[in-house]
Amino acid sequence: MNRELIEITDPYDERIAPYRDIRERDLVGRQGLFIAEGRVVLNVLFSTSRFRAQSLFLRDNRVQGARDLLERVPADIPVYVAGGEIMDEIAGFNIHRGIIAVGERCSSQTAEELLDSLPENALVVALSAIANHDNMGAIFRNAAAFGADAVLLDSDCCDPLYRKAIRVSVGAALKVPFAQAGKAQEMTALLHARGFDVLAMTPQGERDVSEVSLGPRTALLLGAEGPGLDSGLLEQWPTVKISMREDFDSLNVATASAIALHHIWLKR
Amino acid sequence: MNRELIEITDPYDERIAPYRDIRERDLVGRQGLFIAEGRVVLNVLFSTSRFRAQSLFLRDNRVQGARDLLERVPADIPVYVAGGEIMDEIAGFNIHRGIIAVGERCSSQTAEELLDSLPENALVVALSAIANHDNMGAIFRNAAAFGADAVLLDSDCCDPLYRKAIRVSVGAALKVPFAQAGKAQEMTALLHARGFDVLAMTPQGERDVSEVSLGPRTALLLGAEGPGLDSGLLEQWPTVKISMREDFDSLNVATASAIALHHIWLKR
């Protein structure tokens, strides 16, 4: 392996500043950057990702195991290496995965631009008020598994490029195109205007998701667990449910997305 | 409300000893007891649970909001109350839910006894090497939602009554009967002997789970994400998959359980 590795011995080295105090930065934000961790996610970042990496940072004992990955890293992306203690001191906690990258958010596409770029028979997952990063990551994972073309987020959703959301998505948050689309009402109106049949998921839906017949373009609309979708949205759009025992309250929202997306996958 | 509340003012009061250092005890075990937290889970514990509570512990500012719950608590179960600071000192961290109970594991049923207690047309979820408590809890939640009659666990599975597993299951771990069933080979042999068609889930399955025709008794067999089911098991039993994009590795195991269980629910 003749890849140049830049050894870091000073935890205050300015070159690795974006890796400093990772958890604190999760809370305050990263101004156009994001953190991706672990081999599976980084394989996505350096292959099918929509985003560009800024640098890669490896624990010294992970260099051997990361050979395949390093072959994919463009020559102009610096690769930093440090011992475990220094790496943990920089990050502010024990980075047991030992393999981490900083990526750059691209200049964000509008929801209109994103929808205009999609094929005739597109499938979109539209999210309203999904505020939990685990759920956000899991929904992206499911969207990727079942071939959704894009995810739209209303203004009450959390960030799919938050560190934990990327991790839970096993990299799908870097791959499936997404865009912010204002309030939920605006988002669904836009989808409708672009020829999408909006299907609003709710435990009180009119039909089971297995019984839906699909038009050319489908948008699956999901709201937060607990409150669910706003009643205005449920009045405006056809509703679908996942049939289940009547004495059971409801499923996790990411789980519901997977069940619905698999049924849609089988019909497309 | 005339329910007697026992005020705790001394964090070293022996009556609340099972609530002490909750996280440390998560690791070392609780000798026949378990911890259940939050209103939704405690509603299950005091209604449809298979297990008996030993006591209930409320933060003083939660007493009003817990009225409905308190009406369900049997008269011989002590209800302790403390201020937030004392409660947090006892528990060893910030109990923001402020409502928590200790339950008693019943003398455990064998897998044979459990299977013998099930109806003719039973559905069982059989788990091999599910070692992650989030996944375990989520699988129980899905099993409850789609009417599984029982869960069998092989000897490599983690404990469904671990605190986090109960929480993620939203109480389903207290409700859906489960039993340990030895090694995975023994578990599946037992299911077969009791008339169950074993369906082994794997990304390389022969048929999509939507295409399966069900016999009277079905056992859905799931293994850990990553390694998946042991190849011996996959050779021995019919396999089913969840169709998805070919370039995507696989789903989370709990998500896979939900998709399969919903298809089975629609066919039963």
Image: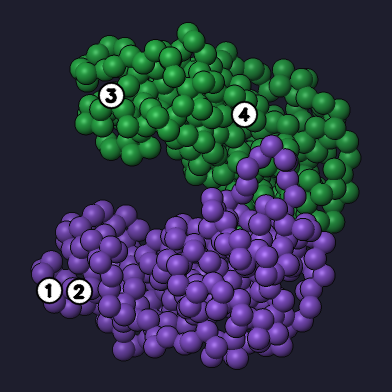
Chain colours: A green, B purple
Label 4, on which residue? Answer: A175
Indicate whether B46 appears above or below A100. below
In the rendering, at what x and y percent does residue B197 appear? 72, 76
For marks 3 and 2, give the one nearer the viewer.
Answer: 3
Q: Amino acid at mark 2?
A: Ile
Q: Looking at the image, which residue is at 34% across and 65% down?
A: B99
Q: Is residue A209 left or right of residue A80?
A: right
Q: Looking at the image, which residue is at 47% across and 87% down?
A: B109
Indicate whether A21 appears above or below B58. above
Marks 3 and 2, how far apart at CA: 47 Å
Q: Residues within 10 Å of mark 1 (few under 14, many from 20)?
A: few
Q: Looking at the image, which residue is at 31% across and 89% down?
A: B76
Label 2, on which residue? Answer: B16
Mark 4 and mark 2 in contact? Answer it, CB < 8 Å.
Answer: no
Q: Residues within 10 Å of mark 4 (few under 14, many from 20)?
A: some
Work out whether residue A266 or residue B194 is closer to the camera in this orientation and state it.
B194
Q: Amino acid at mark 4?
A: Lys
Q: Secondary structure at mark 1?
A: loop
Q: Which mark is drawn over residue A82? A: 3
Q: Amino acid at mark 3?
A: Ala
In the rendering, at what x and y percent does residue B158 appear? 42, 66
For marks 4 and 3, give the one nearer the viewer.
Answer: 3
